[in-house]
Amino acid sequence: MKVIIVDDEYPARKELRYFIEKYTEMEIMDEFDNGLDVLNFIQESTLDAIFLDINIPKLDGMLLAKTINKFERKPKIVFITAYDNYAVEAFNLDTFDYILKPYSDERIISMLDKLKNAILEDNCKDKIEYQKVSNKISLWKNDKIHIVDVHDIYYCEARERYTHIFTKDEEYEIRECISEVEKTINNDSFFRSHRSYLVNLEKIEEIIPWFNNTYILKLNKGKYEITVSRGRVKLFRQLMNI
């Protein structure tokens, strides 16, 4: 979560930096004391949020906000100002929040918490939409990023704090729980057959009846064998028309 602080008063920037660093994981990329430098900066950088005063030199905060509002990807704007007469105009620009100075600790902490959650939600939506369009997932192996089509994944296996992802010939390890991997893949062809397994139904070659009315699934010419747990058998049968 990348943010900047824009205020022409150093004490105000210092105070806000204290709260951001203490109560969030946001990265403060830079601080600015005038609007023109901000405009130049954001045209070359990707930001999640801007903490913005209104009375700043060269390009005032309200005009800067109106300019930013025309961007295709707009960072969230939080006005922190001593002027209350711009509030209606600010919210017409879809401003995230409008905080009057001097603010209380509770007010700023509450805003930061809501902002953090809003940024995370937006980033999650962006990621899911990207996955829907591309059907790609980025996986690390041997210090390189491999772009893998999710349709090429045979199955995923949870191992302690990691998840191992298997394609026909490769195995990748990522430091995410299997539930997060399932959300990232976001594909109807994948089925959680067991708490430790996420299997691509299109890659199943054999279904072997097992004890307690469960199944063993064979993939990749028998190279991979996956268990279907008792609690998932009924849904599995429905999906496979068994």
Image (cartoon, helix red, strand yellow):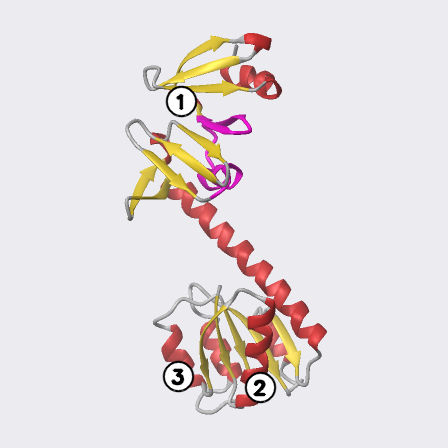
Q: Nearer the viewer, residue 136 or 15?
A: 15
Label 3 packing within 10 angstroms: few (<14), some (14-19), many (20+):
some
| Secondary structure category for the residue under label 1 | helix
Q: Position of residue 29 (x, y in %)?
A: 43, 73
**What residue sits right under mark 1 in the picture?**
202
Q: Amino acid at mark 3?
A: Asp
Q: Amino acid at mark 1?
A: Glu
- Of mark 3 and mark 2, the one earlier in the sequence is 2
How far apart in space, not on screen, are marks 3 and 2 (Cα)? 18 Å
- Of mark 2 and mark 1, the one earlier in the sequence is 2
**What residue sits right under mark 2 in the picture?**
12
For residue 204, above or below residue 61: above
Residue occupying image coordinates x 47% and y 43%? 176
Checking the image for residue 226, the label placed there is none
Disc number lying in front (3 or 2): 2
| Secondary structure category for the residue under label 2 | helix
Q: Nearer the viewer, residue 39 or 186?
A: 186
For residue 161, above or below residue 241: below
**What residue sits right under mark 3 in the picture?**
37
Q: Which residues are magenta?
A: 176-199
Confirm whether residue 240 shows in the render. Answer: yes
Whether residue 241 sits left or right of residue 92 in the image: it is: left
Q: Amino acid at mark 2?
A: Ala
